[in-house]
Image (cartoon, grey):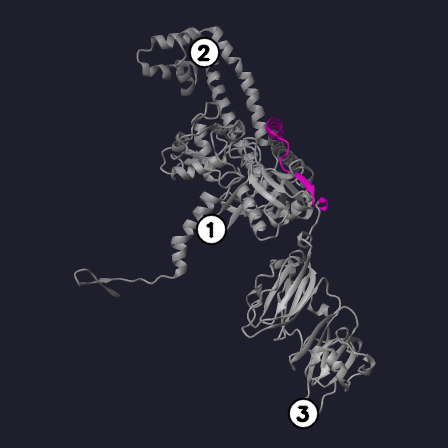
């Protein structure tokens, strides 16, 4: 029990009841979650979410299937009788179903006015008071025989009217209309397929449940067009499991006269603005240099993104680059999650066709049962009418001689041996129609009705005949509403495979490394016209090398780490700036410095490390290769003794090693065997003085050393004791002073 103080400083007792969080979730959250799943976000076997179904049925009941267009605001208001949500949400649902928006291959709403575009993020649709709508002709198939009890009807939210639980679509609309929804704990993403292909596939399935889908259902077909990159493995996965993804890319043409690429179809999953924004971002980052201008030229003729390019640019190669780096090529992720009798299920295409066929068979059975009842009722009335044909005068006499109106029906029943329904029907016949000709003409229908009822009853009992009806309807739908594919198909084997490396512009660069951890990458073209290198005070360049923009850089630090960077990932700079600060660029420790850098194209050759201890280690460059794009490798070389010399070699070479600034030895790298691990301490190549502070102080390639007697210093075996440096050699080589 707790006590709570009120405004009058009096204390009021309140009860706090403990409740398990699982109970709270079950009581408060689960009903909401189930409502979102069942009544909002996940489509059902007819291909509609509840919001779609309520909107279309409201339009159907308003006579908009055959009538003139009506203001959208009026339709929204009418829909609110079934869908108790705000008008904005209902209108947004309507927009996506319209012909003007272009989100569907077969729009359900014939529209007039601005409804935005599926392929544009910023093209807003007009307000409901400015636009007009009616149902498209394909809705004849959506509502086919709905008034014959083909589907179940339930009360709306306030029980003031009835609404259908499902719509009796005569074709598998679930596969023809794209649908996406996010519920609680699950989502649905269903791509669209070509109507003609879907109908043909459904017919093949009904005839043979083990049919090969790929022969009739070629691939998805999307309203924004584009080229679907067909992968049999990926498509089979989607068809079988209902999960997977496929790639789709834009279509373009090249205007050689104006050096302009025109993109006129884009993936369904993206929009014009996202594509243009990404391309501009790449241009600003310097990753694309071939484009001079990009603009949206979409007009009444349709979508168009214009890309102006430099004269010598290869348009196809540039588009391959843009496909790789921008949403001009995108993936559609499929998750065929739908509700089957209130239960969410993820189904493959064959399973969806099976569920739709069962649903459609039930609808046709309901329709046949309705027709049988209607015809039986009519036959029953006509059978009563045929009985008075034997004595019309008697019928007239009974009616004329009956004193009370309420006795007319009972008297007719007893006079002709008919039931109350038949007697009521006869009593309501106009006086002018109580003649032999009229009655004979009416009862001629008896034979036809009997035959029709018999045929209907046989059909009702025959699964094969019901399936034949479905197939006949599917053929009619395919013939009447079928269209050619919008999205073309190309096999993945026909698509040129390009890597990111192919997109990197190849040009010569010079790299500079300074003592204070600054790094510069300057193009050779820029370097020719540049002045003196700008450096921080007391800083100096410790290494520079020439390479190309397609190389990879290895940077070795004083903490035995090696950092890997692609040259193309570093922005070009000029001599007049300090360059990149490697501590920030590579994430170095505060006291970590880069000692050496090298540029490589492949991992051939080896690294040679010489330490103060007189040891040297030889490590193949392949030891630094990684399949993953790792930026840092630890234990790149031994840490047991300070390193004096780091150098990359492509082939065997001679190295000059100086001890204590006094003695020197020339050894060939072939004398140093490869280390078993990167961090191995190496082998002794130079003999140091015992019990002294003797150490290796310097090393360099022999090509950097000038001497009249090179062989004087050469060692044929290791470890070497070296030879005392001659005075004339010291004077010739400034690094020895």
Dividing the picture into quadrants, the one containing residue 728 is bottom right
What range of the chain is rendered magenta? 471-494
Mark 3 or 1: the one toward you: 3
562 vs 157, nearest the viewer: 562
Q: Quadrant of the C terminus?
A: bottom right
Element under disc 2: helix
Rounded to the nearest angstrom, the CA distance separating label 3 from label 1 is 75 Å
- Indicate left or right for 518 with 666 as reference: left
Q: Quadrant of the N terminus?
A: bottom left
Can you say whether 304 is above or below 606 in the image? above
484 vs 124, nearest the viewer: 124
Going 42% across and 52% down the picture, which residue do you hit? 30
Going 72% across and 79% down the picture, which residue do you hit? 616
Residue 411: percent from left, percent from top: 37, 14
Q: Which residue is mark 1?
A: 184
Element under disc 3: loop
Mark 2 or 3: the one toward you: 3
Q: Which residue is mark 3?
A: 692
Counting residues from the N terminus, which is met first, the one under dot 3 or under dot 1? 1
Counting residues from the N terminus, which is met first, the one under dot 1 or under dot 2? 1
Other residues around mark 1 within 10 Å, as few (<14) / some (14–19) / many (≥20)? few
């Amino acid at each position: 029990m707790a006590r709570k103080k009120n405004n009058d400083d009096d204390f009021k007792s309140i009860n706090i009841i403990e409740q398990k969080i699982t109970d709270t979730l079950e009581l408060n959250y689960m009903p909401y979650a189930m409502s979102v799943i069942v009544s909002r976000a996940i489509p059902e076997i007819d291909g509609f979410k509840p919001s779609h179904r309520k909107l279309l049925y409201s339009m159907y009941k308003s006579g908009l299937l055959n009538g003139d267009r009506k203001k959208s605001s009026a339709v929204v208001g009418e829909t609110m009788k079934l869908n108790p949500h705000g008008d904005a949400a209902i209108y947004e649902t309507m927009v996506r179903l319209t012909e003007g928006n272009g989100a569907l291959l077969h729009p359900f709403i014939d529209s007039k006015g601005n409804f935005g575009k599926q392929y544009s993020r910023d093209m807003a649709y007009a307000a409901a008071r400015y636009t007009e709508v009616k149902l498209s002709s394909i809705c004849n198939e959506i509502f086919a025989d709905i008034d014959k009890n083909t589907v179940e009807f339930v009360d709306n939210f306030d029980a003031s009217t009835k609404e259908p639980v499902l719509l009796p679509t005569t074709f598998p609309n679930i596969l023809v209309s794209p649908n996406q929804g996010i519920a609680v704990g699950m989502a649905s993403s269903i791509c669209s397929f070509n109507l003609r292909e879907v109908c043909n596939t459904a017919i093949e399935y009904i005839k043979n449940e083990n049919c090969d889908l790929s022969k009739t259902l070629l691939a998805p077909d999307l309203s924004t067009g584009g080229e679907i990159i067909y992968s049999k493995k990926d498509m089979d996965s989607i068809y079988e499991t209902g999960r997977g993804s496929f790639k789709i890319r834009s279509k373009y043409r090249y205007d050689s006269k104006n050096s302009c690429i025109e993109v006129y179809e884009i993936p369904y999953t993206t929009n014009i603005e996202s594509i243009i924004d990404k391309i501009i971002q790449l241009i600003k980052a310097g990753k694309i240099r071939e484009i001079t201008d990009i603009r949206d030229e979409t007009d009444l003729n349709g979508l168009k993104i214009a890309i102006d390019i430099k004269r010598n640019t290869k348009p196809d190669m540039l588009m391959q680059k843009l496909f790789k780096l921008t949403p001009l090529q995108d993936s559609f992720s499929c998750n065929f999650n739908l509700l089957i009798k209130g239960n969410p299920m993820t189904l493959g295409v064959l399973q969806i066709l099976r569920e739709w066929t069962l649903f459609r068979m039930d609808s046709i059975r309901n329709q046949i049962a309705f027709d049988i009842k209607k015809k039986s009722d009519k036959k029953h009335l006509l059978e009563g009418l045929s009985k008075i044909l034997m004595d019309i005068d008697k019928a007239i006499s009974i009616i004329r001689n009956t004193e009370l109106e309420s006795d007319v029906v009972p008297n007719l029943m007893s006079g002709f041996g008919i039931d109350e329904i038949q007697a009521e029907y006869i009593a309501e016949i106009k006086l002018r129609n109580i003649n032999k000709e009229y009655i004979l003409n009416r009862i001629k229908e008896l034979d036809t009705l009997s035959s029709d009822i018999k045929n209907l009853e046989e059909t009702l009992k025959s699964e094969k005949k019901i399936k034949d009806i479905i197939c006949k309807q599917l053929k009619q739908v395919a013939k009447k509403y079928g269209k050619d594919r919008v999205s073309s198909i190309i096999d993945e084997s026909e698509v040129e495979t390009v890597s990111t490396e192919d997109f990197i512009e190849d040009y010569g660069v010079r790299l500079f490394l300074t003592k204070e951890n600054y790094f510069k990458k300057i193009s050779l073209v820029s370097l020719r016209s540049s002045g003196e290198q700008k450096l921080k005070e007391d800083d100096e360049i410790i290494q520079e090398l020439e390479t190309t923009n397609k190389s990879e850089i290895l940077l070795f630090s004083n903490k035995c780490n090696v950092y890997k960077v692609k040259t193309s990932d570093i922005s070009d700079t000029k001599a007049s700036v300090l360059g990149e600060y490697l501590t920030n660029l590579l994430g170095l420790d505060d006291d970590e410095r880069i000692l050496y850098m090298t540029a490589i194209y492949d991992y051939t050759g080896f690294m040679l490390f010489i330490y103060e201890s007189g040891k040297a280690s030889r490590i193949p460059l392949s030891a630094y290769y990684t399949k993953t794009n790792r930026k840092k490798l630890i234990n790149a070389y031994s840490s047991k003794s300070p390193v004096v010399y780091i150098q990359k070699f492509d082939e065997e070479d001679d190295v000059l090693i100086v001890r204590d600034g006094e003695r020197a030895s020339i050894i060939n790298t072939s004398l140093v065997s490869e280390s078993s691990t990167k961090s191995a301490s190496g082998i002794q190549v130079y003999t140091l003085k015992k019990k002294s502070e003797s150490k290796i102080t310097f090393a360099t390639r022999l090509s950097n050393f000038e001497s009249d007697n090179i062989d004087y210093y050469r060692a044929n075996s290791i470890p070497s004791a070296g030879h005392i440096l001659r005075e004339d050699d010291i004077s010739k080589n400034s690094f020895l002073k």
